[in-house]
Structures are given as C-alpha cells and as structure tokens.
Amino acid sequence: MASAPALDFAGHHFLALADRALFWPRHGALIVADLHLEKGSWYAAHGQPLPPYDSHDTLDRLARLAAQTGARAIWCLGDSFHDRDAASRIVPAVADRLHRQAAAAKLVWIAGNHDGLTGGGWGGEVADEMVVDGIVLRHQSDPAEVRPEISGHFHPKLRRNVRGRHVARACFAGDDRRLILPAFGSLTGGLDAADPAIAANFSGDYRAMLVAQGRLLAFPCVRAGHDDVTASTVAAAR
C-alpha cells in the first residue's frame, strides 16, 4: 500500500495501517490484535443491550484491509473472540464470513487470555505463539523475552489535550525490540500508552505511534512509575 507509512522494526520492513493494523510485505501478512468478536452479544447477555453489529463491522474492516494489501495471510494476535463462550453466540452469517476469510487468506489464531483456542473452529490454524524471521508473535508481551516481539493485549491509546479538547487515538507502542499493537475490534476500549501497565513491558523509554494523513507520528513515552501497576489499569484495556 503506497499510502501506508513504513514502520521498520527489528531489521524488518513493515507498513503501519491507519486502521489499527500492521502489514508485513515480506510475508504478505496482515497482523491484527484483539478483535474481541461478539463483545456486543456478551454485553447483551449481561443486561446491557447493544446493537449486534460489532462482529460484522470488525470483519468488514478486516476484509477491506486484506483486499487493499493483497494479504496472503492474516495473523490474529489473541483475544480474537471476546470470551470463551462466544462460539455459542455467533450467528450463521458471522460464522460463514469467518470461514470465507480463512479460505481467502491463511488465518493463524494466536490464543489470548479471553478466547483460549476458540478460533480454531472457524478455519485456520491455532497457536500459542509463533516465531517468524526471529520475531516472536504472541498475545501478551513477556518483559523477559530477549528476542524481538510483537504482541497485543493492552489496547494502547495516545491521549492528548489539543486546543482544549481531549483526544484519544488507538496507537502502536514500541521501541527497537518490542511492539504492542492497538486493538482492532470495533467495540474495544483502550489504555493510555504511557500507563504503567504498558510501560512495564519496556526496559526504557518507548514511543506511542499512530498514522495520520499518511504519516507515522511518534510521541515519546517515558518509563516512569512502572511499579505502580494495578488490576484496575489492566482491566481498563479489556
């Protein structure tokens, strides 16, 4: 995609996509994290009715990016389904779309803390993690990992006050060895990219990065107060 800016990571060339995804031209792979399919139906089942269209919208965007990039593979970095019971709520139309997407491009479902191995029932392959060209792809970052790593889980967002208005945009969070992807799902929330729960995954300062008007903008995040990680900050990203 000519309009997508380059994001060079661990000696490899990627493209950062404005719609919260990463593309690896060398492998023709579209990389996404945290689709949280059927989150709307989960809320409905718990007494908070929402329009049941989030899965369709997420899959619309996924199919559009796959077509635009010519992706031969789609790697989903965990929490592709909102919970372990999502399979019982997926309507036939959504199930059919998943099977068709798996037939169009090689789907790899990496297990997350929400979905377990649910994704394997909808076509494609399931893995706990994968290693490609020396880069580990997993759901949740492992701060002890010494190899380059791409992950999801935290739903990073850049939060800024601009001309008196609070602005929050999904973003990538990363340094030279570790890259955390934004959440791709249509109903996903987010955690401030500078939050201690995210900062704890980096050994030093890192960057919040987002695509705007065809450019990759980077904002410094200082790793400070990383020991003050609470359950509430982690839960806020889910």
Image (cartoon, grey):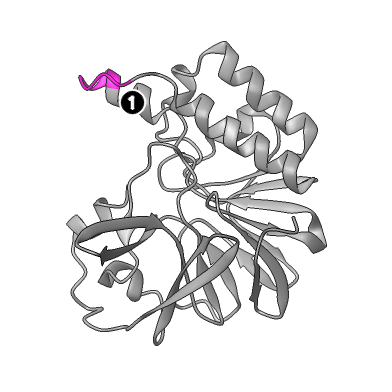
The reply, left or right, for residue 122 in relation to residue 144 is right
Residue 83 visible within the image:
yes
Q: In the figure, is residue 192 to the left or right of 152? A: left
Name of the residue lying farthest toward the front: 163
Residue range corresponding to the magenta coloring: 44-50
Magenta stretch, main secondary structure, is: loop
Q: Based on the displayed image, in which of its 4 quarters is residue 26 positioned?
A: bottom right
Left or right, 225 with respect to 168, comes to: left
**Residue lying at 32% horizontally and 56% vertically, measured from the top left:** 168
Question: Mark 1 packing: few (<14 Cα in 10 Å), some, or many (20+)?
Answer: some
> Residue 224 at what x, y percent from top left?
25, 84
Q: Nearer the viewer, residue 175 or 120?
A: 175
Q: Residue at x 59, y 14 (%)?
A: 93
Figure quadrant of the N terminus: bottom right
Task: Residue 45 in the image: state x and y as whole percent.
Answer: 28, 19
77 or 97, which lies in front? 97
